[in-house]
Amino acid sequence: MFWRARTTSGRVICLSDQFPGIKTEEVMRGLVTFAGLPPVQLGADIDWTANPHGNRTWALNLHTLRWMGRLVGEYEKTGEQAYLDRAATVTDHWLRSNPLGGRNVSPWAWAEHAVALRAPALVCLSEHIHTQRLWTALADHGEVLADSSLYRQGHNHGLDQDIALLVVGCRLDRPRWRDLAIRRMTASAELAIDAQGALHEQAPRYGLYVHRRLGVALRAIRESGAEVPERLVSRREALEAYVAHATQPDGHLVPIGDSPADTRAPGFPTPGPTARVFDAGYAFCRTTWNDPRSAYYSIRFGPGRHLHGHEDHLGITYSAQGHRILVEAGFHSYEQTGYVSWTRSPEAHNVPIPTTGSFRPGTPTHLLNSSIAPSHQSFELTDDAYGVPRTRRVLADHAPDRLTIHDSVPSGTLRSLWHFDPSLKVLSQHDGTIVLGDDDGFRVTLLHFPGAGQAVRPGLIAPGYLRTTENVTVLSPEAPSVLTVIVPGSP
């Protein structure tokens, strides 16, 4: 089936160890498992337009062929010819079924991110299998990747496009593609990551992803024989501080933006200060590093919603004494559903909501003042996202732990929303005071001034991808000015 062709070829940079893990024997039987969803039997004659779970991430993963690339890696480790034969058969079927510009082809087949993630898998296969169809496909992928109109500058997709263009350029011995990829990824990194290390995609999980992919990019540049740009190395190193500060004491990333609440961070070396304000719109603080019982909070402000961000300005998360207290709806999925849209809305976050005016998406929020000391910090923030200025003042104390928040509008009224961790249930409510607790005896007290009109309602948050769980949401009384005090520990 596969003939060995004489071609002008260059260096093979195979990144098979970066492809997601698979159950090898399962794939050999025609089964694939993507996005944590149940396995799907593809069969011998694969329907590349299928999407049995109706899930965008599943459809993308099918067309990236990274699962095929893992088979190539298994062949290289074990020498088992069946793995290579299966990889070659799957790829040839995909190439015949999904010609560039073909009719009745899945929209995911040549989507820019699918191309970027698939091309390195094709490069790995091309080291062992040489067919005219595969070689032509590599050239097609290179042309698509080099097309400036399809390039996602300053985006994690753009970084994946650059990595792919580099390895394809090396394989086809086209140094201009390699050099273009290196120039683009350097400029793109400086656009995506500011000098403080904050990623403008507005989700710490993507900071972690971009850091990992930049590591892959640097490795590919070195293997290509090109010089590694110091500017690229510098931005990747700066990113570590952002991820470290966005890591909660329990080791999980704070679920800001499209960041699943169960994402673990790798534990980058901790920078000295325990509190840091990032100009991109984050305040992070903990009482001490490397202590799971440390108090920790995050506050959002800055530019309007962008890419993987949510409408979470003025939002706060909080944990103390080894317990998460204030959480947000989190990231559920990329599906286009009402619930997913709600998780991005202001109501899914711990924010003040004016009772008059209409919300204006993408409104920036300004940090007016901040003061940081070891035992306490204060912040004042404001915006006009509802057509009226809303101001939030935050005072965090750590001896003992206490969070005090004052929300106000100059005219009309507001209500503050507070989403509590699912482990916490309401134990008592009286005169503006609510005591919540978990099954282990931990207690947290919430006080509102004024107290009359406080409300408790059931909520629904996402503790992980495609998962939901019930929690308690507290609404403050409606007033022009509301003071909220949250005290962890004994009521």
Image (cartoon, rainbow, N blue to C red):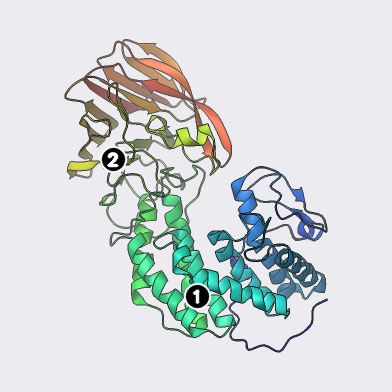
Q: Nearer the viewer, residue 123 or 96?
A: 96
Return the x and y of residue 228 as percentages of the image width and height.
41, 79
Alpha-carbon distance for marks 2 and 1? 39 Å
Eyeballing the image, is 298 above or below 14? Answer: above
For residue 45, side relative to residue 316 (left or right): right
Q: Which circle marks residue 326 in the picture?
A: none
The numbered mark at residue 219 is 1
- Nearer to us in this view, 99 or 292: 99
Q: Residue at x 37, y 42 (%)?
A: 294
| Percent x, y of residue 140 | 60, 73
2 and 1 marks in contact (CB < 8 Å): no
**Dividing the image into 4 quarters, which one contains the C terminus?**
top left
Label 2: few (<14), some (14–19) or many (≥20) C-alpha neighbours in 10 Å: some
Q: Is residue 106 at least partly visible in the picture?
A: yes
- Secondary structure of the residue carrying tag 2 is loop
Q: Which of 140/356 is in front?
A: 140
Q: Is residue 163 left or right of residue 303?
A: right
Q: Quadrant of the N terminus?
A: bottom right
Sequence-wise, which precedes: disc 2 or disc 1?
1
Residue type at mark 1 is Arg
Give how far across and how far down residue 340 sits, in percent. 50, 36
* Element type where label 1 sits in the image: helix
Identify the residue position indicated by label 2 in the image.
363
Location of residue 97 by image quarter: bottom right
Residue placed at 46% from the left, 32% from the top?
A: 342
